[in-house]
Amino acid sequence: MARIKSDFPDKFGIPRQSGLLKTLHSTIVFEPEFRNADALRGLEGFSHLWLLWIFSENVRDTWKPTVRPPRLGGNTRLGVFATRSSFRPNPIAMSCVKIEKINLTGEGAPTIEVSGADLMDGTPIVDIKPYLPYADSIEGATGGFAEAVRFKHLEVDFAPEVSAAVFPAEKLAALVELLSEDPRPAYQRSADRVYGIKFAGFDVKFKVAGDHLTVVALSPLQP
């Protein structure tokens, strides 16, 4: 039905859940047969959307009843239906995103600009539904193990030899917010290791010591 256009060319570094990075913007681009502005009539009255999408990089012929959630360090097995793991019997995911702008004209219109999406570039979206505050926000809901284990935010800076000015200025806040969430795998954390993520057309290298993350290299990705 549609695909996402985002700044993540691969899976590594994508936020663990939707809505965590408020400054992270992406665009919903409809397939040609669904590019009909009438299909979005009334959507302007809503602030958020539910996206139903496919874990297209994790489609498998088999499944396992238990998985190892990264939030628990990758060492504890839980039932797949007690997690949001991408390794599922049916690789279907959902994300709640904020509507930033609905474009009814222009290239590929209509399109929807959103913030807070946790999708890799090109991910197929199978349905879009409006978020309903009176029904979708449940007072007193509990979050199980996900509430018990919280990730710390990191302080982010750039090494003296690295100039943040080479990075697109309009995406710099999103990069810093992304890095502050500590994109390293929970089971692979070393103060000596240099990690890397690809974001917004750049290869970003960084190191983490304690609660401090330092960007050690920024280089444009080769076309």
Image (cartoon, rainbow, N blue to C red):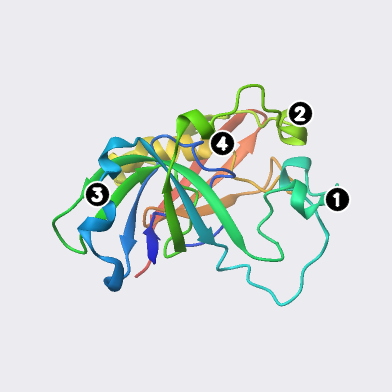
Residue for point 26% across, 44% down: 42
Of all residues, the one furthest to the left in this rendering is 105
Furthest toward the bottom, the residue is 61
Residue type beneath disc 2:
Ala
Q: Is residue 14 visible?
A: no
Which circle's residue, 1 or 4, is located before the other in the chain? 1
Q: Nearer the viewer, mark 3 or mark 1?
A: 3
* Pointer 2 residue: 148
Relative to 187, say whether 86 is above or below.
below
Residue 21, position as x, y percentages in the image: 46, 37
Q: CA distance from mark 3 to mark 4?
A: 36 Å
Q: What residue did someone put label 4 on?
A: 181
x, y percent for residue 195: 59, 50
- Which residue is depicted at the point 39% across and 67% down? 1
Disc 2: CA contacts within 10 A as few (<14), some (14-19) or many (>=20): few
Q: Looking at the image, do the residues carrying marks 1 and 4 touch, with CB atoms under 8 Å apart?
A: no
Instruction: Quote the CA–CA distance across marks 2 and 3.
Output: 41 Å
Q: Nearer the viewer, residue 1 or 101?
A: 1
Circle nearer the viewer, 2 or 3: 3
* Nearer-N-terminus badge (2/4): 2
Checking the image for residue 77, the label placed there is: 1
Label ID, residue 126: none
Secondary element type, mark 4? loop
Mark found first going from the N terminus, 3 or 4: 3
Residue 45 lies left or right of residue 15; in this view the side is left
Dot 1: element: loop
Residue 193 visible from this viewpoint: yes
Q: Residue at x 13, y 56 (%)?
A: 105
| Residue topped by disc 3 | 41
CB contact under 8 Å: marks 2 and 3: no
